[in-house]
Amino acid sequence: MTAPLDARLETVLSLIRAGAHADIGSDHAALPLALVRRGHIGRGVIVELNPGPLAHARRNVALAGLGDRLEVRQGDGLDPLAPDEVPSVSLTGMGALTMRGILERGAARQVRPDAVTLQPNDNPAPLREWARGAGYHLRAERLASGYWTYPVLRFERAEGPDPAYDGLPGDAARRYGPLLLREGSALLHQQVWADVTRLTPLAAPGRPAALELATARSALAWLEGRTSPDPAARG
C-alpha cells in the first residue's frame, strides 16, 4: 500500500487530466498510482533512472495490480519516451534548471508533450522562461505548503506570446508567477514578504541579492495595488 500523497503532490495531481501520461523521476510511483486510481489518467508511463527507486516503483505497481495500466521504464528524463507517445508529462521534486535541461533534451529528440506539469523545488523562473521560448503557455499555477512553499505549474503548447504575462512587472511575474500575482493569495503574500525580509540585509549595491530584492519589492507593490517602482521591469 503506497503512502497518501502530501499537499505538494496532491496539488500536482489536481492539474493533470490525460488519456496517457508520463511521470518522470517518479521515485516510488505514488503520483501515477493515484492518477490512475482517481481516474485522472487512463494509462501511464513511469520513468526512473536509479535502480533503487526503479525497483520500488515496479513493486508498488505490481502490489496495486495496475501493471496493465502503468508501465515502468528505466531511463534518463524523457529518453524512454517516443515522439507523440504521451500527450502529458509531469516532473516533480527537482531543481528548475534540472527540469529545464530534461525538457530541452527531450525537445531535441522531438519529444514535446502537449501539456507539462512541473513542481520545482526552487525558483521556477527558468521554467517560465523555457515555456515562453518553447511554444508553451501557462494555463494554471498553484502554491502548495510543505517543507517550504512549492510552486506547481501547468503549461500547454500554444501559438504566439503568452497572454498570462500581459500588464505585469516582468521580473516579478517570472519569479512569482503571473496567475499567482493576479490571484494574490495569502500564501503568496507570505512568500514575497519572507523574501523581502531575507534579502534586505544582503542587498548591497551590485550584489545578486539586490536584483532579487528589487524583484520581490516589485511583486509586493503589485500585490498591494501600487504601480511597480521600476517601469523598466514591466514586459
Image (tube, helix red, strand yellow):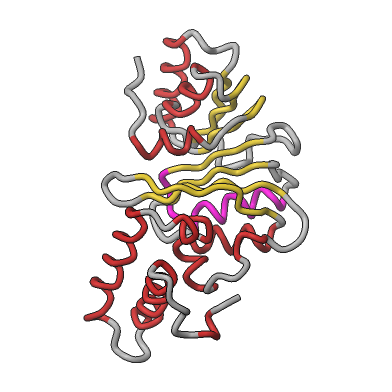
Residue ID at (50%, 19%): 38
Is 42 left or right of 9, judged from the image as shown? right
Quadrant location of the N terminus in the rendered image: top left
Is residue 34 placed above or below 6 in the rendered structure?
above
Q: Nearer the viewer, residue 126 or 196?
A: 196
Task: Give yes or no for residue 45 being in the magenta stretch.
Answer: no
Dominant SS type (magenta): helix
Is 159 left or right of 214, judged from the image as shown? right
The image quadrant of residue 199 is bottom left
Is residue 10 placed above or below 169 in the rendered structure?
above
Residue ID at (72%, 56%): 135
Is residue 42 placed above or below 12 in the rendered structure?
above
Residue ID at (51%, 24%): 35
User: Which percent across, then down, holds residue 20?
Assistant: 65, 27
Is 129 left or right of 6, judged from the image as shown? right
Q: Nearer the viewer, residue 187 or 82?
A: 187
